[in-house]
Amino acid sequence: MTQQRAWLDAHVNLERGVGVPAAQARATAPTLDRMRGVLDLLGSPHLDVPTVHVTGTNGKTSMVRITAALLKSFGLKVGVYTSPNLVRINERMSILDPRYPDPDPAAGEISDARLDELLDTVARIEPHLAELPSFFEILTGAALYWFADEAVDVAVVEVGLGGTWDATNLIDAAVAAITNVSIDHVEYLGPTREEIAAEKAGIVKPTSALVLGETDRDLQRIFLDRHPRRAVVRPDDFDLVRSTLAVGGRVLELRTPLGAYRDVFLALHGAHQADNAATALTAAETFVDEAIPDEVVREAFAAVRSPGRLEVVGRHPLVLLDGAHNLAGAAALRAALDDEFTLAPEQHRTLVVGLLRGESSEMLAALGIDDVTHLVVCRPSSPRAQDPRALAKAAEGLGVDPDAIDVAESVQEALGLAMLRAPEDGQVVVTGSLYVVGEARSILVR
């Protein structure tokens, strides 16, 4: 680990629960003052970069990647900021340059040397700040500084948590895009969909065009009450007309305010990715303020990748990675398994699951573990890891045979147990916390 990475890791990290006081509660007054101080001392880079700002409960990262792929194929130089990372911090920030057509999401990732330079830059301003920034605030400042320095045409930025008080929300986005609203992070965002929607609606500014993928009319009003300069709402203004299963993804028909797109192949698994694609296409179209040519959409959709989201990383047995860390995500994974990865009666499915504290064991029920032949519960590499023995007990309560359950103290051990018992024509599905999916990916994808 470099000196710069060690410095970064010494800061409060809400994602991992590192350095966060145990007494910290949702009632603690949130603030953007720390982030404002960072950006002011960096020269306000967020004011130099036109932005598409993306929030929602599920699908944010995939939508960011699809939107970025579309804008790159359209001919724009695109900065991409996502969180959290699966394996390396570098994954969080990349620049897609239309001069280089490599579809691999890692192709434009920031280099180790450049990231360390950016961390040095933030470290130099830190003594002049009234309060120490957090891990996420440092990376957000570094990413926006890099995008401005590289003169990107547009940045597609994923909200870290919520919206109103997220470190990314000093952006005055040209387009504010929302995927959907479900229950998640209730300790920070509130226990109801209405409270969560109100928090996420904070990214909608009077100067923003709103692209709203959430279809609940009551929730839509919460976003529309922010009075964006323009609102493009599903299903009134855009929609997914048709989504059918295809080898390696789905074939879509989509409708936007400025165009219609038929028989377009999307190289992502899961019916929910078709919904993300519809919102992403509309967000990209809204940003460029013109219809995106059919050939551009086809190129982008065929090339897009979203690591750790229904990602196939092995064939014999079939190995799937999916960071379904909440109930809505688990339901989407279950639907995708039923739709695209159905089992013959004699086939074998192993489920590898690890959760963080606060991620409900109801996840197991949402995943539909009644047809799982072998369940491996494991401990994520996080201070907030949930005891896998508690998950094993919950699985037994749902009717899983105790003899079909293995408890592992690490992701590596869990993968070993899963692969040992999985036949060549079987399936291994790794899911739950992104820490589990990320570590599994680092082991399985060389």
Image (spheres, helix red, strand yellow):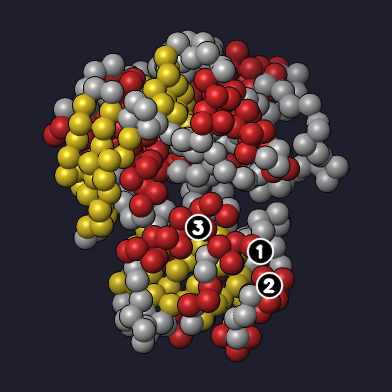
Q: Residues within 10 Å of mark 1 (few under 14, many from 20)?
A: many
| Residue drawn at 33 percent across, 55 percent down | 269
User: x, y (%) of residue 442?
Assistant: 45, 60
Sequence order check: which comes first, mark 1 or mark 2? 1
According to the picture, the residue beneath numbered tag 1 turns out to be: 361
Residue plotted at (66% across, 79% down) = 396
Badge 2 element: helix
Nearest the camera: 303 or 152?
303
Dot 3 lies on which element? Answer: helix
Q: How far, Cα to Cα, is label 1 from label 2?
A: 7 Å
Answer left or right for 166 relative to 430: right
Q: Looking at this view, is 18 or 431 the one in front?
A: 431
Q: Amino acid at mark 3?
A: Ala
Which comes before the other along the chain, label 3 or label 2? 3
3 or 2: mark nearer the eye: 3
- Near mark 3 (Cα within 10 A), the count class, few <14, some 14-19 or many ≥20, is some
Pointer 3: what residue? Answer: 331
Whether tag 3 and tag 2 are in contact, CB under 8 A, the answer is no
Q: In percent of the image, x 34 and y 63: which residue is there?
A: 339
Q: Position of residue 373 (x, y in %)?
A: 48, 82
Considering only vertical position in the picture, is 368 above or below 142?
A: below
- Give the amino acid type for the residue marked by disc 2 in the picture: Ala
Q: Are marks 1 and 2 in contact (CB under 8 Å)?
A: yes
